[in-house]
C-alpha cells in the first residue's frame, strides 16, 4: 500500500479590491462593508496555500512534481490576479470580491487541473496575517 | 481528546536522485534538486500527539519527554547531516519532503507509543521552508 501524504505549497500575490454590492444603496454598502467599501479600493498581499493529497510516487518520492504545480498556479492564478484589481476580473463583475469568494473562484480555476494521482484537498487564502479563509470544494456541507 | 503540537528545527543537506534513471532523466524530473553536490534547508518539524488530559497533571504528555524523544529519534539523526549519505532510511528512499514526513512518522510512532503512555502520534508536519510542507497521518507502510 502506498502511503497518502498531504503536500502543501504557498504562493504570494498582491491585488486590490473593493467590497461592494450594486443592489445596495451607498449607505447600505458602507454599513455592511465599512472601510472595505471605500470607493477607490484598497489592496492586500494575499497568500494562497494549496494542499494536495496523494500517494507518494516511489520513483520520485513526490506526491506531485513541484514544478508542475507551480506552472499550473502561475497559469491559472498568478497571471490572472497578481498585481490586478480583482473587481475588474469578469468573475467579480457580479460577485463580491471577498476572500471567501476568491477562495471558491480559485478552487474552480484549479479543480480539474492535471494533478496526476493527487487531488486538491484544501485551499486557503490569507488576506492578511490575521484573516484567512479555507475551502475544501464542498458547498452546502459542514 | 486534545491535540498537542511541539516544534523542532534542524538543518540538513540533500539532493534528489533516482538510481534507476539516467543523469538526463534525473535532471529533467528533479531540476536543480538533482545536483549531486547537494543543497540544504532549515527544516521545521511539527509533531502533533493526541491524548486525554491527565486529571492530575493537566498534561496530555510531559512536553520535556516529547522534546527529548524528538531530539533523540529525529533531530540528533538529521541535524547538520547530509540526508542521502548519512541517514539510513534515505539510502533507498529519496529525501523529499513527502518521504521525510513518512520517515519521521516511522521513527516516532512506536517510540511515542512505548515511551509516552496515553499519547498517540496524530500528525507529522515537516516544513522545507515556510512555503512548502508535507503532512503525514500514518496509515500505510512505505
Image (cartoon, rainbow, N blue to C red):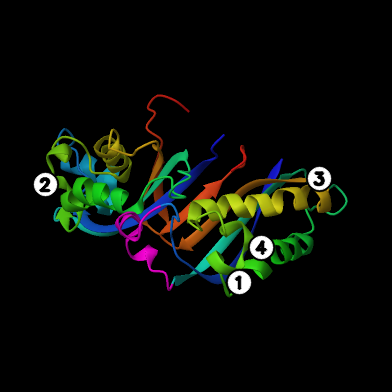
The reply to whether callout 2 and callout 1 are in contact (CB within 8 Å) is: no
Q: Secondary structure at mark 2?
A: helix
Name the spot of residue B47 as percent of width and height, x first: 63, 55
Magenta region: which residues? B21-37
Among the two numbered marks 4 and 1 on one chain, the one whose residue lies closer to the N terminus: 4
Taking depth in this image into account, of B103 and B134 the one nearest to the observer is B103
Q: Nearer the viewer, mark 3 or mark 4?
A: 4
**Alpha-carbon distance for marks 4 and 1?**
8 Å
Residue B32 visible in image: yes
Q: Within the magenta stretch, is there residue B35?
A: yes
Q: Earlier in the sequence, mark 1 or mark 3?
A: 1
Q: Say which of marks 2 and 1 sits in front.
A: 1
Whether callout 3 and callout 2 share a subunit is answered no
Judge from the rendering whether residue B119 lies leftward or rightward of residue A44; answer left or right: right
Image location of residue B141, percent across then percent down: 62, 40
Mark 3 and mark 4 residues within 8 Å of each other at the beta carbon: no
Q: Which residue is mark 1?
A: B79
Residue at the spot x=19%, y=51% of the render?
A81
- Residue corresponding to mark 4: B74
Q: Nearer the viewer, residue B22 or B129?
A: B22
Secondary structure of residue under mark 3: loop
Q: Chain of mark 2?
A: A
Q: Left or right of B56: which side holds B142? A: left
Residue drawn 28% across the image and 33% down it: A112
Left or right: residue B70 versus residue A11 is right
Measured Cα–Cα span from mark 3 to mark 4: 21 Å
In three-dimensional space, the C-alpha distance between marks 4 and 2, rounded to whole angstroms, equals 50 Å
Residue B131 picture location, percent across and down: 40, 59
Mark 1 belongs to chain: B
Residue B8, given in percent of the width and then of the height, sits at 62, 65
Amino acid at each position: 500500500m502506498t502511503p497518502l501524504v498531504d503536500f502543501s505549497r504557498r504562493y504570494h500575490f498582491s491585488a486590490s479590491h473593493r467590497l461592494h454590492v450594486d443592489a445596495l444603496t451607498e449607505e447600505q454598502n458602507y454599513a455592511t462593508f465599512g472601510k472595505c467599501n471605500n470607493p477607490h479600493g484598497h489592496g492586500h498581499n494575499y497568500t494562497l496555500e494549496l494542499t494536495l493529497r496523494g500517494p507518494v510516487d516511489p520513483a520520485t518520492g513526490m506526491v506531485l512534481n513541484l514544478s508542475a504545480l507551480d506552472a499550473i498556479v502561475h497559469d491559472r492564478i498568478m497571471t490572472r490576479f497578481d498585481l490586478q484589481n480583482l473587481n475588474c476580473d469578469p468573475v467579480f463583475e457580479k460577485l463580491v470580491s471577498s476572500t471567501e469568494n476568491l477562495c471558491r473562484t480559485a478552487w474552480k480555476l484549479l479543480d480539474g487541473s492535471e494533478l496526476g494521482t493527487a487531488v486538491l484537498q484544501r485551499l486557503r487564502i490569507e488576506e492578511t496575517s490575521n484573516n484567512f479563509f479555507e475551502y475544501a470544494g464542498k458547498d452546502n456541507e459542514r | 481528546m486534545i491535540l498537542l503540537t511541539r516544534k523542532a528545527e534542524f538543518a540538513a543537506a540533500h539532493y534528489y536522485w533516482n538510481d534507476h534513471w539516467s543523469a538526463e532523466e534525473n535532471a529533467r524530473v528533479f531540476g536543480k534538486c538533482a545536483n549531486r553536490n547537494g543543497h540544504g534547508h532549515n527544516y521545521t518539524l511539527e509533531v502533533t500527539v493526541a491524548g486525554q488530559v491527565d486529571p492530575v497533571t493537566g498534561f496530555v504528555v510531559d512536553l520535556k519527554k516529547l522534546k527529548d524523544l524528538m531530539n533523540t529519534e529525529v533531530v540528533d539523526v538529521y541535524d547538520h547531516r547530509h540526508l542521502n549519505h548519512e541517514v539510513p532510511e534515505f539510502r533507498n528512499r529519496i529525501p523529499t519532503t513527502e518521504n521525510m514526513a513518512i520517515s519521521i512518522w516511522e521513527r516516532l510512532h512506536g517510540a511515542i507509543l512505548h515511551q509516552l503512555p496515553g499519547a498517540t502520534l496524530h500528525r507529522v508536519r515537516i516544513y522545507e521552508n515556510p512555503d512548502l510542507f508535507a503532512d503525514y497521518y500514518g496509515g500505510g507502510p512505505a
